[in-house]
Amino acid sequence: MTPDQETYNPWTVVNLVFHHLAEQGLHPVLGETGDPAAAATGLLRAMGIAPAPEKAGPADPEVQDELAELRRRIMPGIE
């Protein structure tokens, strides 16, 4: 990665896609079919954006809360 290359957190892409699919009435799952961050990383690279390093830390609390709410709505009883 070059110093001026743009980076982005793959988990933010996972959140965006998960949210979009849920809004379309689909029922995405996390973890049952593999690590979604790997696909998000590939998508970022295909668009010329480097994935942010794993050590970038967890998502902001607001994003974590939003993901938890999506899980409650889409997968009731699974927490």
Image: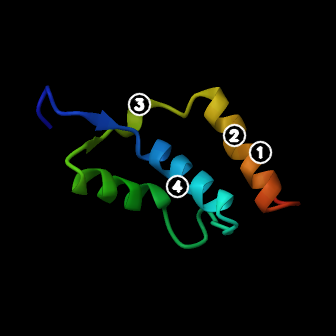
Is mark 3 in CB contact (under 8 Å) with mark 2? no
Query: On residue 17, which mark appears?
Result: 4
Mark 3 and mark 2 lie on one chain; the one further toward the N terminus is 3
User: Label 2: which residue?
Assistant: 66
Residue 79 in view (yes/no): no
Residue 60 in view (yes/no): yes
Q: Residue at x 34, y 53 (%)?
A: 41
User: Label 1: which residue?
Assistant: 69
User: Label 3: which residue?
Assistant: 56
Mark 3 and mark 1 lie on one chain; the one further toward the N terminus is 3
* Measured Cα–Cα span from mark 3 to mark 4: 20 Å
Local SS, label 3: helix
Q: Position of residue 48 (x, y in %)?
A: 19, 48
Q: Position of residue 10 (x, y in %)?
A: 41, 46
Quarter holding the N terminus is top left
- Vertical relation: 3 (above or below) 73: above
Q: Amino acid at mark 4?
A: Val
Horizontal relation, residue 11 to residue 38: left or right: right
Q: Position of residue 28 (x, y in %)?
A: 63, 66
* Measured Cα–Cα span from mark 2 to mark 4: 13 Å
Local SS, label 4: helix
Mark 3 and mark 4 lie on one chain; the one further toward the N terminus is 4
Mark 2 and mark 4 lie on one chain; the one further toward the N terminus is 4
* Measured Cα–Cα span from mark 1 to mark 2: 5 Å
Q: Position of residue 31 (x, y in %)?
A: 59, 64
Is mark 1 in CB contact (under 8 Å) with mark 2? yes
Mark 1 and mark 4 lie on one chain; the one further toward the N terminus is 4
